[in-house]
Amino acid sequence: MEYNKWTTALATAGVISLASAAQAEEAPMSQVLTAVSTTTLSGYVDASAIWKIGTGNAALPGRAFDGVGKLDGFNLNVASLTLEKPLSEEQWAAGYNVQLLFGPDAVGYNVAVANNNAANNNSDFGIKQAYVALRVPAGNGVDFKIGTFNTILGYESFESYLNPNYSRSFGWQLEPTQHTGLLASYQLTDVVSVAAGIANTHMAGINLRSPRAESHKTYMASITVTAPDSWGFMAGSSWFAGFMDGFAGNATPTATGATQKDTVNVYTGGSISTGLEGLSVGGAFDYRFNGANAVTPGSNWAYAIAGYVSFQATEKIKLNGRLDYTAGSDGTWYSVGSGTPGASDQNSMGAVTFTADYSLWANVITRAEVRWDHNLDGDKIYGGGGTSGDPDADAVTVAANVIYKF
């Protein structure tokens, strides 16, 4: 071991011994190794190619992460790195989670709060989660997250590899994504778990505050039922219900108070084992009241229903289908002019999605997808006029998705 000149001089003078110096220098390193020994590093790189059949790529309302700006070409969607120390089985366990995003899909997971309570959301870098995890030994143990964490609502995830399909459902767009606050979860029984939390705002925005009042917060709660092994073929099935009520926090209050209304989300969904080998089904219902809507900023509404079916055909092939429906106040997905003769006063859309997942390489997800979107009001909202082609009431896209997980 090499020592610095000051340590060597003290040892020569007999003030310290080299053995004690070695122990002193090794102790900090030992403490660091102990602290990080249970920390895991994981992540993924998500890339895609997507084409819209025909001309006109000006719009695909209701689509998230695979719409305008990505059509008719190849894309880096996002890369993610996660450092995590999960909670152990100890009574007073502690841990943390930090997930960083890089790439176009990181936009919206804000990196800062600028002046006037507005989020700077246009960066290709984002903090998706960063929280301290704690357990308090009350009853079966109450687990807490303090910091910025994922929303508790929704069937689908931001991480596309966790979803049965590459493209997101309409319901994804109606749900919040991220909160800064405190979330508590508790396992009531082997079957039932509950969660409740309080956050600064309803929307994604680290350290955002409600412009209405400093005491105005967002409240959330959920319950999950998971079928145990004793339920036979339904073992592993789960169902979830939750709600959220709070102010979005990204809008300046207006004189009419239209933007100061609470946004309310109600969600229920889950997946059920059918008893048939490899076959499972699922469903989700999202309802949002008073969401961000510039056309009808008062008492606007929107809901989405989705049905899922998955079949593990072989060890390497998995087939997934989804049927989507959504309806909402004019302005939820697009605007055709409420009250205009011949124009619908609401937005109604449906979609059918088929995804084939074929495993070729270890740690890699490779899948192909075909999706058909249809406007149920007959509004020609897909594509654009002029040189980009005439708008249409239907849109068909084909996509390929490749994800490496580590």
Image: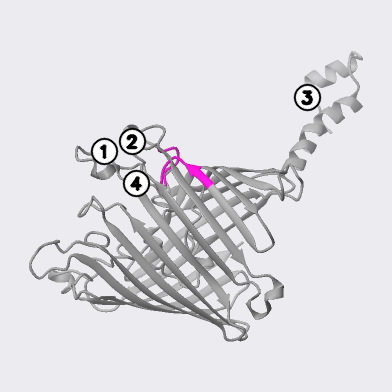
Bounds of the magenta segment = 197-208
Please state which amino acid type lies under the numbered disc 4.
Answer: Asp
SS of the residue under disc 3: loop
User: Looking at the figure, which quarter contains the C terminus?
Assistant: bottom right
Alpha carbon separation for disc pair 2 and 3: 56 Å
Chain-order first, disc 3 or disc 1:
3
Percent position (x, y) of residue 248? 36, 45
Mark 3 and mark 4 residues within 8 Å of each other at the beta carbon: no
Chain-order first, disc 4 or disc 1:
1
Indicate whether residue 199 is drawn in magenta.
yes
Percent position (x, y) of residue 94? 69, 42
Q: Residue at x 45, y 69 (%)?
A: 284
Chain-order first, disc 2 or disc 4:
2
How many residues crowd around disc 1 within 10 Å: few (fewer than 14), some, or many (20 or more)? some
Alpha carbon separation for disc pair 3 and 1: 62 Å
Q: Mark 3 points at which residue?
A: 4
SS of the residue under disc 1: loop
Mark 2 and mark 1 residues within 8 Å of each other at the beta carbon: yes
Does the rendering let one see residue 66? no
Q: Name the residue under label 2.
A: 211
In the foreground, 111 or 256: 256
Q: Which disc, if any, is residue 262?
A: 4
Q: Which residue is drawn at 50% across and 61% down?
A: 241
Mark 3 and mark 1 residues within 8 Å of each other at the beta carbon: no
Chain-order first, disc 2 or disc 1:
2
Q: Mark 1 points at which residue?
A: 253
Instruction: Give the dominant element type of the magenta stretch: helix, strand or loop.
Output: loop
Chain-order first, disc 3 or disc 4:
3
Percent position (x, y) of residue 337? 14, 61
Q: Which disc, if any, is residue 400?
A: none
